[in-house]
Amino acid sequence: MAAMMRQAVRHAQTATAGAQAWKDYVRAGFVGAVGKTPLIKLKGPSEATGCNILVKNEAMNPGGSVKDRAALFLIQDAEERGLIKPGGTVVEGTAGNTGIGLAHICNAKGYKCVIYMPDTQSKEKIDTLRTLGADVRPVPAKPFDDPMNYNHQARRFSEELDNAVWTNQFDNTANRDAHYHTTGPEIWHQTEGRVDAFTCATGTGGTLAGTGMFLKEMNPNVQIVLADPPGSVLYNFFQRGVLEREGTGSITEGIGQGRVTANMEGAPVDYAIHMPDEKSVEVAMRLLYEEGFCVGASSGLNVAAAIEVAQQMGPGHTVVSLLCDNGLRYATRLFNRSWLETKGLLASVPTEFHDKLIS
Ligand code: PMP
């Protein structure tokens, strides 16, 4: 009898714990699964600098990248403004990751999805979009001031359709709102406010601006550092006040910018760092083969910048950055020996990892 009573009490306790767990841990569908990514301390970079080098693992978003957050806010913004009704079409210009986020959310919400992207982007991202059922339209890469630039093509196509919206990730600030309302607060809570600097590469600028604005509001002393790849104008814009490219092209995808987007306007950037591809590739390799994280080159750049900032600040500081997406999106490029060779980047891969590369 006593044993039965004890068992009943245990069942009741489990049920109560279960109810609590349901409330705290169960996420409502794909949309509810976006965000709340883990903050992870990187071992090697933290030991080398004497700092806490922490990264939000954005590859753990349900669509696999940091852009799931922006995609969700862009679609919710279109819904709230009455720009799209059930069964409508979402049209966007993207390097791929925003498109992948949008395609997932469109499936979850019953919209169609049309994606214009420059044909310079990885095959893996195009294949992923097609697998998700999006109508993918790779177009020749053109600068923003060319009417055939992928964004303008996306806008024009959306205007030809009924019940369609061009979500306009570059200049619709619902993008940075996503990070002001989610990424920033998550970092603040996960570090219990103990964050000294945040480093971030930018494409649209949404991640850097939104997260930076929130962190600065919480503590004006947090250093917001823009990490820029070759071929982008933002490094010179923030360091010298001129819109001038620094270096030529980059193998990084989804980052680097030729103008100040509406999302970047007013971003609280303390200073910018220019990061050569050699360093971004080396750090991406170390993240995979020493830390265990398979990530793309923009994540390598983010962490390379975090290490540089930590070295400047000195031991005892906490520097936060992001792993933007999964490296499998670039398997035939970043982790392929012959591709790296053609880009002159094989020497950037530490020699002990050469035999691990796909050939
Ligand atoms: N890294 C990757 C891999 C991306 O695809 C993007 C977005 N294009 C970014 C970083 C930059 O994010 P944001 O657009 O918020 O500046």
Image: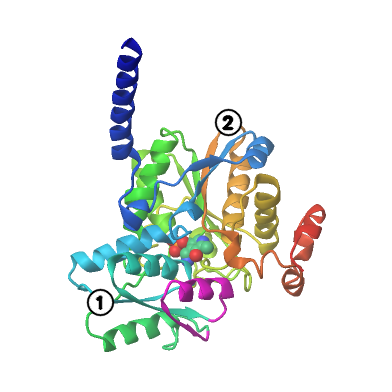
Q: Residue furthest front?
A: 1
Mark toward the viewer: 1 or 2 = 1
Q: Against 97, is 92 above or below?
A: below
Q: Which amino acid does label 2 sit on?
A: Gly
Location of residue 149 (image quadrant): bottom left
Q: Residue furthest top?
A: 2
Disc assigned to residue 316: 2
Magenta-colored span: 119-140
Q: How crowded is mark 2: few (under 14 residues within 10 Å), some or many (20 or more)?
A: few
Q: Earlier in the sequence, mark 1 or mark 2?
A: 1
Q: Against 165, is 36 above or below?
A: above
Q: Against 43, is 62 above or below?
A: below
Side (left or right) of 52 relative to 350: left
Q: Position of residue 11 (x, y in %)?
A: 32, 25
Location of residue 263 (image quadrant): bottom left
Q: Which amino acid does label 1 sit on?
A: Gly
- Residue toward you, 49 or 216: 49
Picture residue at 41% right of the left edge, 88% below the top: 147
Label 1 SS: loop
Picture residue at 34% right of the left edge, 72% below the top: 168
Q: Where is residue 94 in the image (x, y as percent from the top left)?
A: 44, 73
Magenta-drawn stretch contains 125 = yes
Magenta-drawn stretch contains 348 = no
Q: Does the image show residue 265? A: no
Q: Position of residue 304 (x, y in %)?
A: 62, 51
Picture residue at 52% right of the left edge, 66% below the top: 255
What residue sits right under mark 1 in the picture?
88
Q: Where is residue 59 in the image (x, y as percent from the top left)?
A: 50, 55
